[in-house]
Image (cartoon, grey):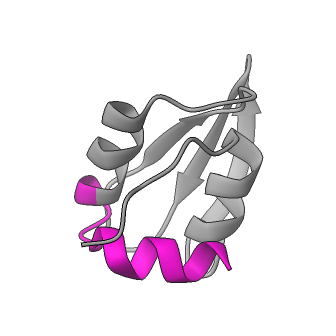
Amino acid sequence: MPKLTNISGTKAVKAFLKFGYKHIHTSGDHAILQKLGSPTLSIPLHKEVAQFLLKAQIKRADLTIQDFIKALK
């Protein structure tokens, strides 16, 4: 299984956008993403997003880590 490395919040948002999420607004330092029929995601726009937080958001979006890593490229 590929490893999920430390990535920035901006890169994470760009990856989620490839799966149909839309950046609705920014609240403080968090990007709020929505997709019809899926839960709303809140991604911190930090230099590095904690792996456990990123994994939790990937799971909420009903994605696999492998698919998410491919979307980062």
Left or right: 10 as drawn, with respect to 15: right
Left or right: 2 as drawn, with respect to 46: left
Left or right: 26 as drawn, with respect to 56: right
Q: Can you tell which quarter of the image residue 26 is in? A: top right
Q: Can you tell which quarter of the image residue 11 is in? A: bottom right
Which residue reaches farthest top? 28
Residue 20 x, y percent position in the rendering = 55, 81
**Closer to us: 51 or 30:** 51
Residue 43 x, y percent position in the rendering = 56, 38
Residue 31 belongs to the span the image colors magenta: no
Residue 24 x, y percent position in the rendering = 69, 52
By secondary structure, the bulk of the magenta-drawn segment is best described as helix
Q: Quadrant of the N terminus?
A: bottom left
Rendered position, 71 above or below 35? below
Rendered position, 68 above or below 12? below
Query: Is residue 48 visible to us here?
Result: yes
Residue in the image at 31% along x and 47% along y: 55
Residue in the image at 27% along x and 73% along y: 64
Q: Quadrant of the C terminus?
A: bottom right
What's drawn in magenta, residue-wise?
Answer: 59-73
